[in-house]
Image (cartoon, rainbow, N blue to C red):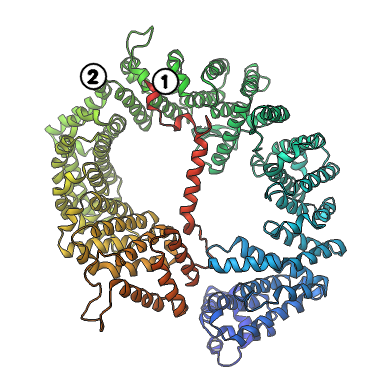
Amino acid sequence: MAAEKLKDLSQPIDVPLLDATVAAFYGTGSKEERAQADQILRHLQNNPDMWLQVVHILQQTKSLNTKFFALQVLEGVIKYRWNALPAEQRDGMKNYISEVIVQLSSNEASFRAERLYVNKLNIILVQILKHDWPARWRSFIPDLVAAAKTSETICENCMAILKLLSEEVFDFSRGEMTQQKIKELKQSLNSEFQLIHELCLYVLSASQRTELIRATLSMLHAFLSWIPLGYIFESTLLETLLKLFPVPSYQNLTLQCLTEVAALNFGDYYNVQYVKMYNIFMVQLQSILPPTTNIPEAYAQGSSEEQAFIQNLALFFTSFYKFHIRVLETAQDNISMLLMGLEYLINISYVDDTEVFKVPLLPGMVDGLGAQLLQRRQLYAGTMSKLRMLMICRMAKPEEVLIVEDENGNIVRETMKDNDVLVQYKIMRETLIYLSHLDHEDTEKQMLKKLSKQLSGEDWTWNNLNTLCWAIGSISGSMMEDQENRFLVMVIRDLLNLCEITKGKDNKAVIASNIMYVVGQYPRFLRAHWKFLKTVVNKLFEFMHETHPGVQDMACDTFLKIVQKCKRKFVIVQVGENEPFVSELLSALATTVADLEPHQIHTFYESVGHMIQAESDPHKRDEYLQRLMALPNQKWGEIIGQARQSVDVLKDQDVIRTVLNILQTNTSVASSLGTYFLSQISLIFLDMLNVYRMYSELISSSIAEGGPFASKTSYVKLLRSVKRETLKLIETFLDKAEDQPQIGKQFVPPMMDPVLGDYARNLPDARESEVLSLFATIINKYKAAMIDDVPRIFEAVFRCTLEMITKNFEDYPEHRLKFFSLLRAIATHCFHALIQLSSQQLKLVMDSIVWAFRHTERNIAETGLNLLLEMLKNFQASEFCNQFYRTYFLTIEQEIFAVLTDTFHKPGFKLHVLILQQLFCLVESSLLTEPLWDAATVPYQYPNNGMFVREYTIKLLSTSFPNMTATEVTQLVNGLFESRNDLSTFKNHIRDFLVQSKEFSAQDNKDLYAEEAALQRERERQRMLSIPGLIAPNEIQDEMLDS
C-alpha cells in the first residue's frame, strides 16, 4: 500500500517513505523486500514527472543514497530532455543546483562532510553546462570566478568544476556531442581562460591551504594541454610551478603539470623557456632524489606516493626528450644536465615493475646529417650502450616460446598467452633494432660477453639466459649478412656447448627452448649454411624425443617454421651428401616420430609436405609423397579391407579414432602440398565418402533412438569428428589446389549425394556446419563454373538451415556464420543463379540477410552487411534493378536505420553508412525508372523517387525519435542527400545524428571511428618496412630467397 502511495506524484512525495524504500533496496533485508523496492524505484525513475519532485526530495532527506537516487533521475532528464523543458523550469533547476553547491562548499565542515554529494552535484552542473553554456548562460565563468574569490572552500570546489568541464569538452566529447557543439565549447573555454588563469596564479601564490593548492594544480593539469601558450610561457605560471615542485605534498601534481608542458610541441618559439625550465628542474631534482640513489631499491621500499613520483618522473623525461632534446644539445652547459637526465631514466628502467618499465624509449636521437649525425652518435654513445644492456637484461618473452617458469620455480609448458607481455616484446624489439643499427659492434660485443658468462657459470640463471636469447633472436635482419653469419656461428656453437655441459632436466629444457627460438629467427643464415641447418634440424629431431612438457611442441613448431623458409635446401643433394635430406628423413621417419603425440605428428607431416612441395621433378615428388604416406595408407588399407568383410569393424571406437587420426594426417599434408596432393587424395577419396555416409547413418539412427541427448554422447561426438575431418580434408585440398577446373569436375559431382543429400536428409542436430563452408570454398574457388549446381545446393541446404537458425539468436552458432559465408560466395560469383530464384525464394534470401545483420554476434552481422552491399550493387547493375528495389528498398532502409541506432550494432557502423550511401545515391541517379511508392496507397504523386525517399526518411526518423525536432530531422536528411557523394561528410552527418537521437549516450564510441584507426595502422606498417629488421624475417614473404 505504502508503495502505491509513492507512485502517486500528484502531490509532494512522502520523503521518509522514499528513504525507507531506498534503504530497503540497499539494505540487508530479504530478497523479496529488495526486489519490491527495486520495482518501485524503477517505476519512479521511468515516470516523466518524477524530476519535478527532485528539489523537494533534496531539501527534505538526510539520506545520501536517497539524494543520489534523486540526482540520478535529474541527470536522465538533463541528458535526454533538457532542451524540451520550458525556460523557467530550466532556470529554476540551474539556480537551485548552483545555490546548493555554494551553500555546501562555503564552510569547511559541511564541505568535508558532504563531499560525495557535492561531487555529484558538480557533475550535474557540468551536464547542464553542456546544453546551456555559452548561449544561454553567458556569465557562467565570470560568476564562477567571482564566487571563488569569496571563500577558500568555494574556490576549491570551483577548481573541481572547471576540471570536470575541461575533461567533458576535451577528453570525453567524441560521440557525446555534435561536432558543432564541441567546437563552440572549446572556443568559449579558450576565450574566457584569462579569468581562470588570473585566479590560478592568485591562489598558487597567495593561498596557504594545501587542499586548495592541490585542487588548483589538479585543475591546471587538465587545462595545460590545450590553453593558449602565452598563458604558460609569458606569465609567472612556470616559475610558480617550479617553486612548488620541491614541496612534498605538491610534488606529484606539479610533476604532472610540468609533464603536460613538456609534451607541448609548437615549433622553436619558446626554446629559451624550455631550457631554463629543464635546468631549474634538474637542480631541484638532485636535492629531492640524489643521482647516486639506487632507484630500483628505493622504489621497492617506497610508499605509493614515492612510487608514483618515480613513474611520473619517467613520464616527464620521456615527454621532454621526445619533443625538446635537440634544444638541450646545442650548448655545452646543457649537455651535462641532459646526460644526467638520461642516466636517471635508465636507472628508473631497472625498477622491477612493468608499468614503470614501459620502455622510456629515446626517439629522435638517431637522425641528423653527415657530421651532425656522427656528433650526436658520439654524444649519446655511453647512454646508448647502457640502454642496450638494459634491453638485453629485461627482454620480454616472444610468442614462439612455449616453455616458462611457473610460480613454484618449475619449468612448464605455457598454457595461456599474456597479451601485455607480447605488446611489451614488440616495443622492446623495435627499440633494440634501432639500438643495433646505431652500433652493431657494441650490440654484438655485449651479447657475446653475456653469453660467455653463461658458459662459465658466473652469470647462469634461467632468466638471464632467456632474456639474452630472446634479445639475440629479436634483432634478426638488422645486421649485414656477413656480420650476422659471424655472430650466429659463435652464438649457436656456444648454445650447443652449453646444452652438452649442463646437467639437470629443467636446465636442459630451458637451453633447448632458447636454441630453438634463436635458430627459428634466422632463416637467412640457415639457408646459407647447410652444415648448420642440418645440425640444427637433427638437434630438433633429438628434442622430439625429449618428453619434458613443451619441448616437443616447440621442436615441431620450430621445424615447421624453418622448413617453410628453407624448403629447397632439403630436396637438393648438398655437397658431401649422397642423397637429398628429405629422402634420408623419410627413411628414418618411423623412429623420428615415435615419441610424438598425434597433434605433433600432424605438424611434422605438414613440414615434410612443404619440403616435398619444393621438389620440381614430378616423379620424385610422387615417390616422396608415397613414402611419407606409407604408414597411414597401410593402416587405412587394413581398415577398409576388414570393413569389406564386415562393416561392424568401423563401429569400434579405437578404429574410429584411428580413422580420424589418418584423416587429420592427410589434411596436414594437403595444407602444405596443395595441388600435388592429388595422387594421395584420389587414392582414398571414394572409400572416404563411403565411410562418411555410413557414419552419418549411424549418427542419425543414434539420435533418432536416443533423443537429443544422444548427440552429446562421446560415441556420436567421435563419429561426427570423422565426418568433420573428411569435409575439412576435402575443403583444404580444394582450397590449396591451383585453379584447375578438372579437379573440381573430378571431386564435386561424387560429393553431391553423400555430402549435400546427407545434409538435407539429416536431423538438425546431426548436420555438419562444415558442409556449408566446404561449398562456400568450392564456389569461391571455381566461381561461375559452379552456376549450374547452385539450385541443387540451394535446395539441399537453404530452407533446412534457415529453420535451424531463425528460431533465436543462439542455437547453432557455427551454422550461422558459415551459412551467410556460403550465401555471400553465391552472391559474389554466381549472382545469375540468384536472379533465377522464384520470388518466394528470393524473399527468403533477403529475410535471412536482414536476420544476419540484426544479429548481435559481430562477425555474423558483418557478413550479413557485406552480403547486402554486394547484392545491392549487383542488382543495381542488372536488368531487374527496378523490380528488386521496388520490393525491398524501403524495408532495407528501415532495417539499416534500426540497427544503426541501437547500441548493440556499433561495430557495423562503417557498413551501415556505406549501405545508406548506396541507397541514397541510387534514388538520386537515373537508374530507377519506376516509382518506389505504391500508387494505390499514396494519395498524390511525387515528382521523383528522390523526393519520395526524402519524405519517407523524414517520417521514419520523426516517428522513431520523437525527442528530435522536425527541423533537426529535416536538416539531417537533407544533409545526407547533399553529402551522398562525399563519404566523410556523410559519415559525420550520421555521427551527429546518433548524438542527437541520444541513443548512443555515455558509452564507448570507438567503433564509430574504427576506419580512421585502420588507416593509422597501415601508415605504421609502411614505416616499419623502411627499417631493416623491424618486421621480423619470418613475417616477410620471401619465397624467392630460397632458391
Furthest-left residue in view? Answer: 645
Disc 1 vs disc 2: which is toward the camera? Answer: 2
Furthest-bottom residue in view? Answer: 11
Q: Which mark is residue 541?
A: 1
Counting from the top left corner in percent of width and height, residue 535 is at: 45, 15
Q: Name which of mark 1 and mark 2 comes first in the sequence.
A: 1
Is residue 992 left or right of 360 when viewed as pictured?
left
User: How many discs appear?
Assistant: 2
The amino acid at mark 1 is: Phe
The amino acid at mark 2 is: Glu
Counting from the top left corner in percent of width and height, residue 948 is at: 31, 75
In the rendered image, is residue 377 in sight? yes
- Mark 1, residues whose alpha carbon is within 10 Å: few (<14), some, or many (≥20)? some
957 relative to 220, above or below: below
The residue carrying mark 2 is 623
Seen from the viewer's position, the closer of residues 310 and 717 is: 310
- What element does badge 2 sit on? helix
- Which residue is found at the position 54% from the left and 20% from the top? 484
513 relative to 915, above or below: above
Q: Quadrant of residue 785?
A: top left
In the rendered image, is residue 854 in sight? no
Seen from the viewer's position, the closer of residues 856 and 253 is: 253
Quadrant into which the C terminus falls: top left
Counting from the top left corner in percent of width and height, residue 910 is at: 41, 58
- What element does badge 1 sit on? helix
